[in-house]
Amino acid sequence: MIRPETPADYEWIRALHTEAFAPSTLEAQIVDDLRAAGDHVPDLCLVHEHGHVMLSRGRVDDHPALGLGPIAVTPTHQHQGIGGELLRAVIERAQATDYTLIALLGHPTYYPRFGFRPGHELGIETTYTAPPEAWMVLPLPAYSSDVRGTFHYASAFP
């Protein structure tokens, strides 16, 4: 079952991200900081018994957009399709919003199966130094061709 996170989940979510990204605690801190700043989108932060995905507010110049991540699955349940289930669920929910697109830095052979494509194909750049194939976007129904420029993540991202 996939559902929106609730405050009762926060401690478990922090432990999940800490375990999934060990020894790094950066991802768990980003999740906490996004919530503290009010930059997460509560209806688009989903939990599964063994995973979590977060979408936060971003922008492409003046156009509202979403940043994907962090996403985590418990190490003992990775490679079982849970991350894909979470991605499909959060994309479906995001399609019913007024946000123009979802952006991410991620593995170039994983995310395209969910419709993500290199940002440069749509004229969307990132402020991060990253290989062009790792910078991806997924246009949502509110997207139009005038959405071009630089994607800006919420301030919790380093």
Image (cartoon, helix red, strand yellow):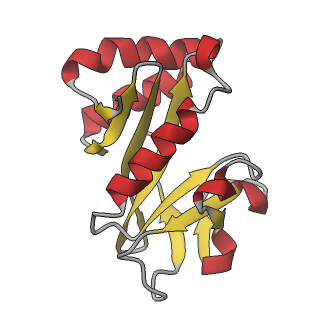
Percent of width and height locating residue 67: 46, 52
Is 34 placed left or right of 124 in the picture?
left
Percent of width and height locating residue 81: 60, 33
**x 27%, y 38%: residue:** 37
Vertical side of 12 occupied by 158: above or below: below
Is 92 placed left or right of 24 in the picture?
left
Q: Residue furthest bottom?
A: 146
Quadrant hosting residue 3: top left
Is 119 placed left or right of 34 in the picture?
right
Which quarter of the rendering shows the C terminus? Answer: top right
Please state which of residues 15 and 112 is positioned toward the viewer in this rendering. Answer: 112
**x 60%, y 79%: residue:** 122
Res. 69 in view: no
Percent of width and height locating residue 88: 48, 48
Quadrant hosting residue 36: top left
Percent of width and height locating residue 156: 42, 39
Which quarter of the rendering shows the N terminus? Answer: top left
Res. 97 in view: yes
Count of numbered marks? 0
Please state which of residues 58 and 121 is positioned toward the viewer in this rendering. Answer: 121
**x 50%, y 39%: residue:** 85
**x 38%, y 74%: residue:** 141
Is 2 placed left or right of 131 in the picture?
left
